[in-house]
């Protein structure tokens, strides 16, 4: 019992072994293979040294280094016929993609530029020939095409409304508007004021709607109200009322965007709103200023006749003899049409307006009519081209469609908006006002 309590005695067992975890029979040596191969007393040579066999010779025998060259092989020493040195893909296509031009050509000599036009071309591109592939079509489209000489029904022929004008309908509409104006002139100043105010309001509405179609957000209601107020105030309170109405328009337009009626791009939309008020309302208010004079109907009639003469003369002469394009902002107008319109405008002033009071107040005196003819002939084409510039920037052909065969009121009264102030100040300078 005591022997069991004292534990095992020394010498009964030497060690404790755990099955499966028996240690290696021999100690591992440095450099010895773990696969049981006999250790080698020779050391491997350094990688930069030339290969030698174990006997000290240079012929290698079974030495694994015997097939190598004298040193390492770098990437620059790869043979040209190796697959890694062969080009991959189309070199010309890759050069065009990176805008460097084909190999062997100067840098950027054939680079591809992406510069789309802001507006569609005036004439559609010709259809590709039958059987042509996509690449052939692109090559044909890139070649310059000589412009054809303009003629009747083509751009540059002097037709201010484009090639799709219905001339019989345009003539009927023009005669109807002329008759309406003559009736208002015959009734008196109040009827003429009402007619001019209605026309200016409709023209301003067309202008603001065209802006909205192009993405702007003008204060249309405020602008139309300001246009009507300018013409009426000019007639009732003379020239002193015009700055007052313009100042109030600027103030209320700023408040329009400040109070959040329209919040998108306030500076941009405020600017186009004031442009419409100045362009249509301010220039058109000279009609109301003329009507304040006893001879104001005669002045207004003279301005209308000169403008109609310019439009008609430019249309007829441009269609018959138009060859030279006038301006890039209006490719349908020609130099011949411009000269013809100015000549007919001057002739109208000298032959017809010279018989209308106040320009024909002295029989045989053509000086006043002569001055008006020169002034109107210069102002009318400027008004026409400025409206064409605005329409081209907006990307539209006509401001409206209220007048069959003509487009909108702005398309017919664009030149008149410039002739009105020119006629007013010409009469002022020549002292033709009775009061």
Image (cartoon, rainbow, N blue to C red):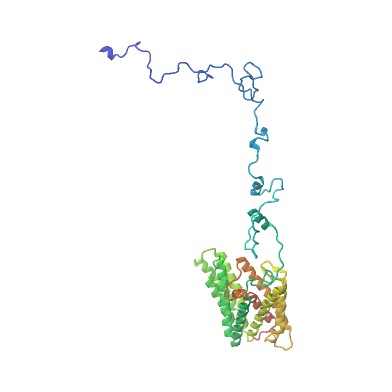
User: Outermost residue, bottom direction?
Assistant: 363
Q: Is residue 166 above or below residue 32?
A: below
At horizontal 38% and vertical 15% (from top left) the residue drawn is 15
Q: Quadrant of residue 355?
A: bottom right
User: Outermost residue, left direction?
Assistant: 1
Of the 4 image quadrants, the one containing the C terminus is bottom right
Residue 239 percent across, percent down from the top left: 61, 79
Q: Is residue 29 above or below residue 189?
A: above
Marks counted in the figure total 0
Residue 7 percent across, percent down from the top left: 30, 14
Q: Is residue 57 above or below residue 266?
A: above
User: Outermost residue, front direction?
Assistant: 131
Residue 29 percent across, percent down from the top left: 51, 18
Q: Nearer the viewer, residue 413 or 134?
A: 134
Residue 237 visible in the picture: no
Q: Is residue 168 above or below residue 56?
A: below
Residue 274 percent across, percent down from the top left: 58, 70
Q: Quadrant of residue 292?
A: bottom right
Q: Nearer the viewer, residue 15 or 403?
A: 403
Q: Nearer the viewer, residue 346 or 360?
A: 346
Q: Nearer the viewer, residue 81 or 227?
A: 81
Of the 4 image quadrants, the one containing the N terminus is top left
Residue 61 visible in the picture: yes
Q: Quadrant of residue 230?
A: bottom right
At horizontal 70% and vertical 82% (from top left) the residue drawn is 349
């Amino acid at each position: 019992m005591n022997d069991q309590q004292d534990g095992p005695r020394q010498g009964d067992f030497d060690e404790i072994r755990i099955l499966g975890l028996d240690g290696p029979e021999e100690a591992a040596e440095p450099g010895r293979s773990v696969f049981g191969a006999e250790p080698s007393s020779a050391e491997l040579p350094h990688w930069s040294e030339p290969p030698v066999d174990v006997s000290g010779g240079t012929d290698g025998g079974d030495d694994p280094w015997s097939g190598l060259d004298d040193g390492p092989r770098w990437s620059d020493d790869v043979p040209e016929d190796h697959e890694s040195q062969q080009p991959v893909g189309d070199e010309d296509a890759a050069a065009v993609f990176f805008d460097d031009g084909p190999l062997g050509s100067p840098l950027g000599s054939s680079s591809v530029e992406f510069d789309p036009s802001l507006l569609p071309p005036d004439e559609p591109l010709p259809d590709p020939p039958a059987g042509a592939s996509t690449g052939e079509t692109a090559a044909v489209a890139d070649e310059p095409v000589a412009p054809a000489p303009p003629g009747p029904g083509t751009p540059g022929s002097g037709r201010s409304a484009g090639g799709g004008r219905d001339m019989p309908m345009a003539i009927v509409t023009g005669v109807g508007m002329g008759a309406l104006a003559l009736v208002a002139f015959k009734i008196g100043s109040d009827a003429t004021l009402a007619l001019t105010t209605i026309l200016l309001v409709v023209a301003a509405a067309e202008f603001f709607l065209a802006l909205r179609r192009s993405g702007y957000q003008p204060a249309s209601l405020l602008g139309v109200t300001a246009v009507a107020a300018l013409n009426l105030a000019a007639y009732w309170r003379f020239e002193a009322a015009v700055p007052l109405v313009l100042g109030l328009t600027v103030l209320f337009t700023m408040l329009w965007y400040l109070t959040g009626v329209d919040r998108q791009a306030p500076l941009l939309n405020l600017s186009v709103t004031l442009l419409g008020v100045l362009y249509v309302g301010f220039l058109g208010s000279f009609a109301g200023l003329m009507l304040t004079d006893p001879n104001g109907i005669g002045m207004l009639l003279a301005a209308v006749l000169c403008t109609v003469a310019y439009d008609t003369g430019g249309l007829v002469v441009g269609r018959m003899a138009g060859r030279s394009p006038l301006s890039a902002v209006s490719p349908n107008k020609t130099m011949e049409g411009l000269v013809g319109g100015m000549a007919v405008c001057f002739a109208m002033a000298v032959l017809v307006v010279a018989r209308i009071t106040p320009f024909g107040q002295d029989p045989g005196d053509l000086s006043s009519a002569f001055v008006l003819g020169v002034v109107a002939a210069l102002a009318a084409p400027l008004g026409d081209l400025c409206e064409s510039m605005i329409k081209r920037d907006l990307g539209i052909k006509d401001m409206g469609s209220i007048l069959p065969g003509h487009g909108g009121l702005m398309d017919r009264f664009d030149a008149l908006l410039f002739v009105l102030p020119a006629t007013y100040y010409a009469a002022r300078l020549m002292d033709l006002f009775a009061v």
